[in-house]
Image: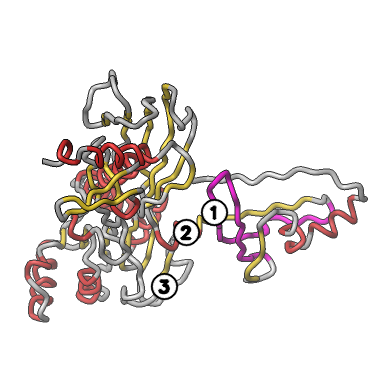
Amino acid sequence: MKTDIKKQFEVDKSIDIVWEHFAALDKIVSCVPGAKLTEKIDDKNYKGEVELKIGPIKAKYGGLIEFLELNATEHVMKLKGTGVDEKGKEKNEPFSVVTVVKRVAPSSGKIGDKAIIDKDGEIHGWIGGGCVQGIAKKESDEAIETSVSRLVAIGNDLELANNEHVKIYKMSCYSEGKLEIFIEPILPQSHLIVIGKSSIAKALVHLAKIANYKITAVAENANLQTFHKVDELITKIDLEQVKTSPSTMIVVASQGEHDEKSLMESLKKKPFFIGFVATNKKLLKILNELKNLGVDEEELKKVKSPVGIDILAKQPYEVAISILAELIQFKNSNPIPKNEKNSENNIVSEKEFYINPVCNIPIDKKNAKHILEYKNEKVYFCCDGCKIKFESNPALFIK
């Protein structure tokens, strides 16, 4: 997400006095609410952060500030700041944006009302009352799971047809209103680990960064000039400290430098995809060596080599294009294995939804408004009305 911070004002002082003030970066930063410097790298480069509050949403951005131009004669200064949402950077978690797009009164949600639902089911913002929230949480989970946006219609006498992209919920809440909400999943930036500093590795890092991948480059004795741009640089073949998620992909393009160790480290991370740039002959030799070292044969079968769609590539950038194409194809056509959803970074937390027997609305058990016990089993309710109806005649709703 791109955020622009703009501030324009007039100062009743001479230009020389104003310039003296603004030539000092710490004084410039003091003019931006919520901003502060955190580290001076050198005379032209600094680290900083800024906290913003937009409606109900708070965000902290951290990154680099660089002086591009500082001309005292012409009184021209150019700064460049780059950064990311610190929460997203640390957790790399999915969320969904929920917007009310249609409303028939009476309903507490209004057209244009908006909220963010995070992976834990917390709602930040307002889209309506208890019944709507339970439905939104469940559908948000499924939208994130499938990476597919959806329209959700809630109420009685609904005209829409239930299908893959439209979900229908009939509810019997006292308001008797109707509501339609649109749920858009926002998924974490795809994470790619590239091991090696070969020409193909460098080209892949360059292209994948353009394609908006989060890049971790791993190579012995590498530095910031080795690759075009990376988010994380590891200068030894060791992935123990690299944070991954179930959707992380790895490409080993070491081409003769620490091939066995690179593959060993990659397999330990249990990535979503692992590719190895090698000929069939070399692949068999390396896999045999790893098997002799005790690596499980089933794990070795997960290594994809040769890697890359066959486009008769010859040059490093051509090969990198073919590899990136295969990564995109694999990512968009294969769901993340469910049994790995709660691994290392807990990307999608498991929730238990209970279907309210009165209105058939899904309820997150942890956030139910009322819990009763009937026939030695717990019954969960989203609102007072459903609880009262159930208590009047439980046998009507649970056979």
- Asked whether the viewer can see residue 332, the reply is yes
Q: Is residue 55 above or below residue 113?
A: below
> Which x, y percent locates residue 112?
49, 30
On the image, which quarter does residue 182 sit in? top left
Q: Quick one: label 1 or label 3, which is nearer the N terminus?
A: 1
Q: Residue at x 64, y 60 (%)?
A: 66
**Residue 65 included in the magenta stretch of the image:** yes
Mark 1 — residue? 59
How many C-alpha atoms fall within 10 Å of the one at disc 1: few (<14), some, or many (≥20)?
some
Looking at the image, do the residues carrying marks 1 and 3 touch, with CB atoms under 8 Å apart? no
* Element assignment for label 3: loop
- Asked whether the viewer can see residue 314, the reply is no
* Element assignment for label 1: strand
How many C-alpha atoms fall within 10 Å of the one at disc 2: few (<14), some, or many (≥20)?
few
Q: CA distance from mark 1 to mark 3?
A: 33 Å
> Which x, y percent locates residue 354?
23, 47
Q: Residue at x 43, y 34 (%)?
A: 99
In magenta, the rendered stretch is: 44-73
Q: Mark number for residue 87?
A: 2
Looking at the image, do the residues carrying marks 1 and 2 touch, with CB atoms under 8 Å apart? yes
- Given this view, does label 2 or label 3 mark the residue nearer the observer? 2
Q: Mark number for residue 222?
A: 3
> Which x, y percent locates residue 281?
10, 65
Instruction: Decide which of 177, 263 is in the foreground and name it.
Output: 177
Q: Residue at x 26, y 59 (%)?
A: 246
